[in-house]
Amino acid sequence: MAPVGKWSWGKEVIQLIDRLRKWTTAGKILSIALAIVLLPWVVQATDNCTQLPDLWLPPNGLEGLADGKISIQTTTGDVCQGTVIEIKVTVHNLSCGDAEAFDVSVYYDNTSNIIGTQTVAGLPGCEYTELTFIWDTNTAPTGEHDILVCVDTGMDVPELNEDNNCLTIETDLLIRPLTPYIEVEKTAVDTNGGTVLPGDTIRYEVTIWNYGCANLEDNPAGHEFTDVLPAGIAATGQTTATSGTADVEGNTIVWDGSIPAGDSVTITYRVDVDGDLETGTQICNQGIVHWDSNGDGTIDSKAPTDDRTTSDPACITVEEPVGPPPLSGTIDAPTLSQWGMILSSCLFALAFAWHGFWRRRVSAI
């Protein structure tokens, strides 16, 4: 689209030339010269854009919009269920062609889950508009969601490019439940470094996060964390936790305590690998977090320390010890008589050298 005011500017040029033409002969000549020079500009000023519009959603932070503005595609971030989320959207018309009225819609995860729709009355060429959507998450499902925005959802505007009308402005936006929401991870490290060998010590570290909007309470009905140790390893008794109480009960690591909403706890414990464990033996164990999900006093939820999608524990394979390479032959040390012969040879060579030195000195005198 031509810049605003270009048509009126063109008319003013034409009027100036007409006034010059009515003056003296010199004025007429000047008017003709001015008309020749400015004719292309006047034609351009009166030539309207004939291109189709091109609506798109520029990525967040993109520069170059009209008036030096920057694109905004943001949300207010993770919330507890029931809290509103503010979503800001920028729609830009890349083309010079004007766009008639169109709709802009915001979804979560896919276009089947609509958050809201707004109608834009129209968007001139090379211009942009900013919209704000409010998402009431009271009935929204908890968990992580992607936020998707689409422009011209009703396909009302013929465009130069119909393939740039949607944009995912955020991934993994978390709507936290009003109950504990637990994530847990366990790592294992050989304290000697490298692979696990018979007789080594393994240090396990378990971190439990409570992403929910309610505390995980210390329940007297049972332990909040357990890890049953398999045959082939034994707890050393070195068991600690950043909060609560960690202990060993028989062949089981246990932890009791509470985790406030949005907080975490780390449990560390060591085990010894049996010294006579055969090479290739797998040590498999999986810790479990237990909690009361609805506050009725009953432990009814659990989360494993490893893959949530399976019940398979993590395994460590005992490797074969690697020693220094054997020598390819033997080296015999000299016997006592051989040492005597070596010493005699050295003395004989020294005496011979001294005798030669003395004779040369006498001859020189």
Image (cartoon, helix red, strand yellow):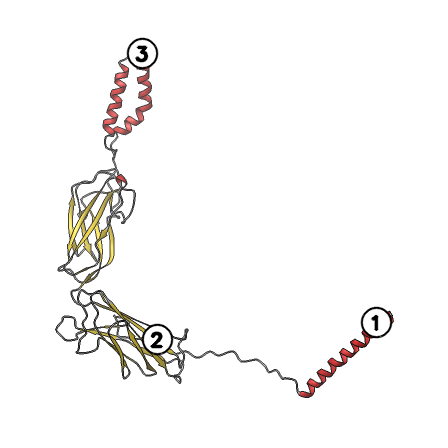
Q: Position of residue 136 (x, y in %)?
A: 14, 56
- Given the image, on which type of amino acid does mark 3 rest? Thr
Of residue 39 and residue 157, the one placed in the foreground of this image is 39
**Apparent side of residue 204 relative to residue 122 in the rendered image (left or right):** right
Q: Position of residue 68 (x, y in %)?
A: 28, 41
The mark nearer the N terminus, 2 or 1, is 2
In the picture, the disc for residue 25 is: 3
Rendered-image quadrant of the C terminus: bottom right
Q: Which of marks 2 and 1 is in front?
A: 1
Which mark is on residue 361?
Answer: 1
State the residue in front, 220 or 128: 220
Between the residue at mark 2 and the residue at mark 1, the CA separation in whole angstroms equals: 79 Å
What is the x, y in percent for residue 71? 26, 46
* Sequence-first tag of 1 and 3: 3
**Crowd rating for badge 1 (residues with CA inside 10 Å; few <14, some 14–19, many 20+):** few
Q: Is residue 313 above or below residue 141?
A: below
Give the structural element (helix, strand or loop) at label 2.
strand
Residue at image mark 2? 203
Q: Nearest to the eye among marks 2 and 3: give it.
A: 2
Residue type beneath disc 1? Arg
Describe residue 330's horizontal placement relative to residue 31 as left or right.
Answer: right
User: Which residue: 72% across, 85% down?
Assistant: 341
Q: In this view, does 166 lie above or below 79?
A: above
